[in-house]
Image (cartoon, helix red, strand yellow):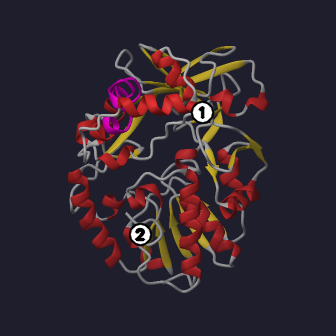
Amino acid sequence: MKQSERVLIVGAGLAGSVVARCLADAGVPSLVIDRREHIAGMCYSSIDEETGVEVHRFGPHTFHTSNERVWEFVQRFDEWYPWVARAMCTHARGVFSLPINLHAINQLFGKRMSPAEARAFVADLQDKSIMTPQNAEEQLLRFVGRDIYETFFRDYTIKQWGVSPRELAPDIVKRIPVRFSYDNNYYFDAHQGYPKHGYTAWVQNMLKHELIEVRLNTPYSRAMNEEFAYTFYSGLLDEYFDYVAGELTYRTVDFRYERGVGDLLGCSWMNYTDMSVPYTRAHEHKFFAPWSKPQRSVVLYEYSREAGRDDDRFYPKRMPEDMSKLAAYVAAAKAEQGVSFIGRLGCYRYLDMHLVVEASMKMAERWLAGERGDLSFAVSPL
């Protein structure tokens, strides 16, 4: 028997938690389930017992947005400290700031160029023989030239995705920023911040409502749908349909911890953009909460590899063979009655945190407005 208007939300990560809270605020009860033993999904953070540092257990999460409604919503559930994302990268040719800015360009080429001079210099580096880039390598060669491409992108991409940039679509690198100023703020958004008590506490406050019940260590089965008025599913899209069209490919990440006294990296995160080391990046977590002033420190090194069925899925690969499978799953999702697919896994696309919040808020609003038909992929089109 259905539980009146109670809805089922599969996944206690960011997408599911935002939907649950938006519905609860409107008077709709929900059950939120998760196969994990903790809430917050991939933005889960916890105190490292050896160092006392708050660690992002699935890699660094930096919140940034220019959407005022999103910023207002996230601030409801914790106090947010201002925090500016600044990254570095290490290559055999040196250590550079990210994103590529005027300082990195001058340092790489041993120059002292002004913004206008650097802009003209990079324009001369561009491979203008490539009229219509057919892959990510050609896109970058057309955009920044061979020196910048090989220093910042080529090897990092191979380590991160397990394939040559020649095998990736050109669209994947169309928005990589190059700045002709000394601004080393990684993002352009109006707001950046970090919740004072960490992401897990922030999500916990989001789920703290009398109309929201959370059950952890609870696997999902499609038979559960029959017990509820509606289902919002943030799990794996291909798994929902029993892999009938084949498995969608992902990259996963293994972590190696290093602990010590004082600063170990000297920055919040460092990309490693050549093949001299096997890891893609490292992040020193005390720099995500500098106000905590811990005496010890912990660094996590990331090793990217192909994901298997038992692995956490970090990055949808979206290779050509994936996209043909995805088309079949999108058609099946749109035909599914009483279910909406949400979040990064449910839509098989990479989404930053602010985009997950925005899409989930819109999804809940549309459902509350009575749009109970085909909501699948409506908010996060592929």
Q: Is residue 301 visible?
A: no
Find out whether residue 152 is within the magenta segment. Answer: yes
Residue bearing mark 2 = 377
Relative height, residue 256 to residue 204 (above, below): above
Determine whether label 1 and label 2 are within 8 Å by CB: no
The picture places residue 236, in percent across and down from the top left corner, at 38, 57
At label 1, counting other C-alpha atoms closer than 10 Å, the crowd grade (few under 14, some 14-19, many 20 or more) is: some
The picture places residue 200, in percent across and down from the top left corner, at 65, 46
How far apart marks 1 and 2 lie (CA) works out to 38 Å
Q: Residue at x 39, y 27 (%)?
A: 148
- Indicate left or right for 41 with 70 as reference: left
- Which one is in front in this view, the residue at disc 1 or the one at disc 2? 1
Residue 186 figure quarter: top right
Relative height, residue 148 to residue 165 (above, below): above
At label 2, counting other C-alpha atoms closer than 10 Å, the crowd grade (few under 14, some 14-19, many 20 or more) is: some
Sequence-wise, which precedes: disc 1 or disc 2? 1
The main secondary structure of the magenta stretch is helix
Residue 120 figure quarter: top left
The span picked out in magenta is: 140-156
Relative height, residue 227 to residue 361 (above, below): below
Q: Secondary structure at mark 2?
A: loop
